[in-house]
Image (cartoon, rainbow, N blue to C red):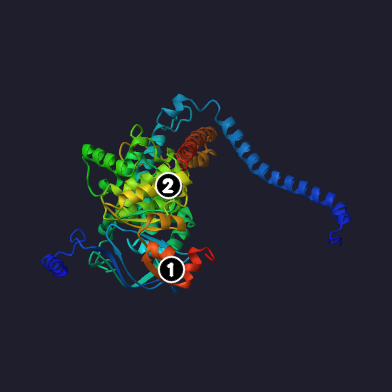
Amino acid sequence: MTTILEKMDMSNTENSLFETDKNVVYDIKNLNLWYGNDCALKNLNFSIKENDITAIIGPSGCGKSTFIKTLNRLVELIPTVKTSGEILYRGTDILSKNLRVEELRTRVGMVFQKPNPFPKSIFENVVYGPKIHGIRDKKQLLEIAEMSLRSAALWDEVKDRLYDNAYALSGGQQQRLCIARCLAVQPDVLLMDEPTSALDPISTLKVEELAQELKNNYTIIIVTHNMQQAARISDKTAFFLSGDLIEYDETTNIFSNPKDKRTEDYISGRFG
Amino acid sequence: MNNVKYFDDSAVKKRINARIIINKVAKIVFFVSTLFALMVLAVLLYRVIVQSIGWLDWQFINSKLSIFADKAGIKGVIAGTGLLMLVVAPVTMLLGVGTAIYLEEYAKKGRLQSFIQTNISNLAGVPSVIFGLLGLTVFARIFNLGASILAGGLTMSLLVLPIVVVASQEAIRAVPGFLREASYGMGATKWQTIKNVVLPTAIPGILTGSILALSRAIGETAPLIVLGIPALIMPIPSSIMDNFTALPVQIYYWTLDAVLVAEYANLAAATIVVLLLILFAMNSVAIIIRNKFQKRY
């Protein structure tokens, strides 16, 4: 099986992110990351599988957000960041200098802690991605907007006011709009950085249900402070502590039978 | 449990009157300071308006310059100032906003960036006469533009450039990081992010700064005089290559010649009123823009 895939890889000389179809989406090897002189991620080694929801948990400041922003290289917006090691995204090292981050970020969408729609109309928000990639045809854009808003379970709530300002929506709707905005470029991976931390319980539930549905078509990596959330929706869970990956396993194992004492202490609420 | 008295109430009673009086004195001192500025403005306006009464009418605004005070008008002078602004506005906007975008979005934060930044601030402190000398040397002589509107406009653009740069930088810096993250996270390039997210959000601040810069340019006299605008009856300019005179320059020459013809002082006063009205109008537009577009996110 692997040999056939490898052969397909060999025949494909172009080093593009849009090819290949392996089961492993991210393969992280010896990843270290520094902010100036502070080491924020320490020698991480693990891999993330296709169509899984992978939850990243851990106390504040443990490097969860840093890690997830490394997966689409958004962490580089902070100028003092240095990295070492490799992150293979479907076989391509995304930490390589030659990588075009614009291409990576098209394949790997991100939803942020605080809903961050643009101060534009709902429609303009959803079609932002397609537009920057050069799609101009109004009819096609409308189609994309409808599909994406349907996938984000928002269409019925906004179909009559697509041209209203996105800030007129509630916080929960704004967050689903941000998810729709990501889906509009049909990415491969969805990164979610504490997507429900600013939402009320009902909106949180909607986003969780949405994540469950989306995992059929997307690989989802979600950072969360909420252990119940990790237990409810994820397939795999990674526990981070001060930049180290302490434990990474099936979510059921992590929550029922943690191997490391520190994991046990954290999930049982003894610290963090 | 805690009955130890460590705070003496009588101390409060002893000082309270003095403290309240000092507060009142402070208020009066600061009010008088404010009043002083207001009084100066009021006296200035009063003198100018009184002197211009009977002189400021449609005939004054719509006639050509003349050596005869009762025939003289400032149609050509207004045209000169207008054309001057037509040069200054696009040049400062393009160069100023461009510089601000480069410094805020593209330049690596480091020595070079802080060196440029310091120099822009220094440039803002250079006296306007010096800019006049620069314009005379570079635009009037080397580029052979003479004392034309183009030469004056370019000189004036350099003079107000730092104002536009600094205001635009502040506006760009105030664009929240989460909007940039959203755009970069979608795979947008830096320029797409600037064009679609940063500039639309920063535009009110940029426009306000630009209008204030233009208000400064419209009232500047020294650089134009150094550039060599003659104290003559200038014809109405029709293109930016023509020689010209502008409102503040005309005010200066009429005031200067008031020792020869007393009525010139009235003409100067009437011109000042026109210039002030234009300035107030521009500043009002700046305020309206700022209020209308204030944060919606």
Above or below, comparing residue B76 to residue A26 in the picture: above
Residue shown at the point (47%, 56%) measured from the top left? B124
* Mark positioned earlier in the residue sequence (2 or 1): 2
Disc 1: CA contacts within 10 A as few (<14), some (14-19) or many (>=20): some
**Which residue position is annotated with label 1?**
A258
**Which residue position is annotated with label 2?**
A205
Of A265 and B60, which appears nearest the observer? A265
**Chain hosting mark 2:** A
Residue type highlighted by circle 2 = Leu
In the rendered structure, the answer to whether residue B69 lies left or right of residue A118 reads: right
Disc 2: CA contacts within 10 A as few (<14), some (14-19) or many (>=20): some
Mark toward the viewer: 2 or 1: 1
Above or below, comparing residue B84 to residue A33 in the picture: above
Q: Position of residue B94 (x, y in %)?
A: 34, 49
Q: Looking at the rendering, in which quadrant would you find the C terminus of chain B?
A: top left
Q: Position of residue A2 (x, y in %)?
A: 17, 69
Q: Looking at the rendering, in which quadrant would you find the N terminus of chain B?
A: bottom right
The image shows a total of numbered marks equal to: 2
**Chain hosting mark 1:** A
In the rendered structure, the answer to whether residue B116 lies left or right of residue B53 reads: left
Above or below, comparing residue A114 to residue B275 in the picture: below
Q: Position of residue A192 (x, y in %)?
A: 38, 55
Same chain, marks 2 and 1?
yes
Q: Position of residue B246 (x, y in %)?
A: 42, 40
Of B235 and A130, which appears nearest the observer? A130
Find the distance from the CA under tag 2 to the CA under tag 1.
Answer: 26 Å
Q: Secondary structure at mark 2?
A: helix
Q: Secondary structure at mark 1?
A: loop
Residue type highlighted by circle 1 = Pro
Residue shown at the point (88%, 53%) measured from the top left? B14
Numbered tag placed on residue A213 in the rendering: none
